[in-house]
Image: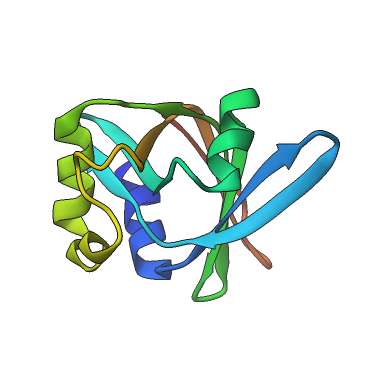
Amino acid sequence: MKRIYDFLKKAEVYYLATTEDDQPRVRPFGTVIEFEGKLYIQTGRIKPVSKQLAINPKAEICAFCDGTWVRIACELIEDDSYDARKAMLDSYPNLRGMYDENDGNTLVLYMKDAVATISGFGKEDVVVKF
């Protein structure tokens, strides 16, 4: 899991894919933390991505860095704990202008049953499950 965390941090931007009815939706994200042995991302409850994940928590994440990419298939599960929200915002203080642990909008989600595939041209795939 640390290898995947390090990759996402180095890439800085990754793309999260969800579904809305039968339409795929993809958007850039940049938050990732390791908290209590799990990888977490963050969004706002008022955003469409939140509503999409509430209906179908299956998602894929893709990031590219230095000629290598990672694809992560997982379920994104809400953690409604204050500590998880605080840990995320403490790691990304620039988000505090838009989010607060107690605002009712900050949503943190952890990756469950994740299968990450690290690939590159001419390289053998590496699969990491966490």
Q: Residue at x 22, y 26 (%)?
A: 81
In x, y percent, where is residue 9? 34, 62
| Quadrant position of the C terminus in the picture | top left
- Give the number of callouts: 0
Give above or below for 36 relative to 24.
above
Where is residue 31? Give x, y as percent.
36, 56
Closest to the observer, 45 or 1 = 45
Decide if residue 126 is in sight here.
no
Quadrant (top left/top right/bottom left/bottom right) for the N terminus: top left
The residue under the point 46% across, 67% down is: 13
Whether residue 108 can be seen here: yes
Q: Is residue 79 left or right of residue 125?
A: left
Q: Residue at x 17, y 31 (%)?
A: 82
Residue found at the very far bottom of the displayed protein: 66
Q: How is the image coloured?
A: rainbow
Q: Is residue 12 left or right of residue 93?
A: right
- x, y percent for residue 84: 21, 35
Q: Is residue 37 depicted above or below 12 in this figure?
A: above
Q: Is residue 26 left or right of residue 62?
A: right
Q: Which image quadrant is residue 83 in?
A: top left
Position of 13 relative to 129 (above/below): below
Query: Which image quadrant for residue 45?
Result: top left
Residue 49 x/y as whole percent: 58, 44
